[in-house]
Amino acid sequence: MSVFKIKRFNKDSGNSIEQFMVNGYYFELTTNVVELSVKEANAHFTSRIDDPKEFLKNVLISSVIDDRERFFLIGEAAENHQLGNKHIAKLHNKVESEIPYICFLAGVAYYHVLHAESPDQSNVEIDYFSTMLPIWLLKKADKFSDMQEQMAARFRGEHNVTIFTPGAERTLSIKVATSKCRIEGADARWAIKKNFRLENNDLANQFNDFDTLMHDIGAGTCDLAFLPAGLKAPKNRDALQSLTDISYLKHIEKLRTEKLLEFFPDVRSLEKFIYENIDKSEMRLLDGKSGKTTDLTKVIHESLRNYAEIYNAKIENTFPLPQGKMYKNVYLGGNGAVLQKFIEEVIAEKYGEEIQQQYHIFLPDARKLNLYALEILSLNETATATAQ
């Protein structure tokens, strides 16, 4: 059997979205994982997929874990399952949770379906794998490196996955040679400092003379990294903080249950609606039965504005502004773009538009900066290894 080689496999595990960059190819999966019985798995799909890209919306795999074959429905295929969102009610411990590992297997499976010469090219060798951990989880360890190594070790070595989706069936043996784990938010600085050609990025020049606070606004937690001027590495543990008590998903779930229960059956459908409509002048929901639309702009905007106010107050308590000095703020993560309008409004009202525009920065592709940083670091390390 021939070998299917993957040079770089980078994965950012979010509470809402799993993002992948494999050999420079980007794709994502909704962070929904549901375990099925063998009977449920065999009966789940009633037709075959025709296009390999359709597999991303129809992921059903199995893996032998602890000597037992287990079956998993993943991503969009699991969105409507009653257990698809069970993990959002608590902090997502990525070191212990099965979700990042199962999604890794799904990511390998999807990339193989897209790019392998044939299903028989079943030995997958990954030269370099990397992922990230949030600051709140890293701070549980005496040394960050201990927790990072524990996470990296989950992916290093041998793995197996079988695709059950009709039309994409195959069994893969996976071997990961090198595995690394980085720090969410803090290491995102590399996506500003460098481009994918490993050249200095002009975008970083605006931070040369300013300390910078990186805001990684996720669905479950918000990671904060205070960087010295020039986007240098944080000086100590105190420069890395995490807000775990203002979950975005919990906030919009409260909005859903209190005011939008008749429109959205679960928090994921509301989250998706907000993400897809936040840039529109009106957030109108179409009723598929009657054809009528309901304008939800006011109620959603008020809720997101309230979240932005709470968030800003929390930040000012965590990293108070030093007397006579300004630092820049960079907003990234899954909800950076969603909250941009409301954070900007809050800052402008409190400190004026000039401060807001000069010191509070929303970069392009904000939600992908962590993943882009993983790609840049992996490009650098694999290039260095090749040169040696």
Image (spheres, helix red, strand yellow):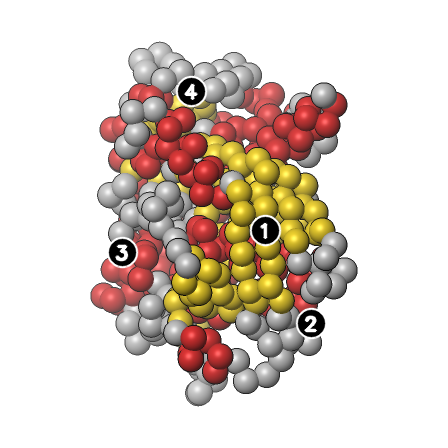
Residue underneath mark 4: 234
The residue lying at 54 percent from left, 85 percent from top is 46
Using the numbered discs, state the Cα–Cα distance from disc 2 to disc 3 in whole angstroms. Answer: 35 Å
Q: Position of residue 8 (x, y in %)?
A: 64, 41
**Callout 1, which amino acid?**
Ile
Residue 224, picture quadrant: top left
Q: Earlier in the sequence, mark 4 or mark 2?
A: 2
Q: Residues within 10 Å of mark 1 (few under 14, many from 20)?
A: many
Relative to 81, residue 372 above or below:
above
Q: Residues within 10 Å of mark 4 (few under 14, many from 20)?
A: some
Using the numbered discs, state the Cα–Cα distance from disc 2 to disc 1 in whole angstroms. Answer: 24 Å
Q: Position of residue 90 (x, y in %)?
A: 27, 52
The disc placed on residue 89 is 3
Residues at circles 4 and 2 in contact by the CB criterion of under 8 Å: no
**Quarter of the C terminus within the rendering:** top right
The disc placed on residue 174 is 1
The residue lying at 59 percent from left, 51 percent from top is 174
Secondary structure type for disc 1 = strand
Q: Nearer the viewer, residue 1 or 323?
A: 1
Q: Residues within 10 Å of mark 2 (few under 14, many from 20)?
A: few
Q: Earlier in the sequence, mark 4 or mark 3?
A: 3
Using the numbered discs, state the Cα–Cα distance from disc 4 to disc 2 in whole angstroms. Answer: 46 Å
**Callout 2, which amino acid?**
Asp
Q: Earlier in the sequence, mark 2 or mark 3?
A: 2
Residue underneath mark 2: 51
Q: Nearer the viewer, mark 2 or mark 3?
A: 2
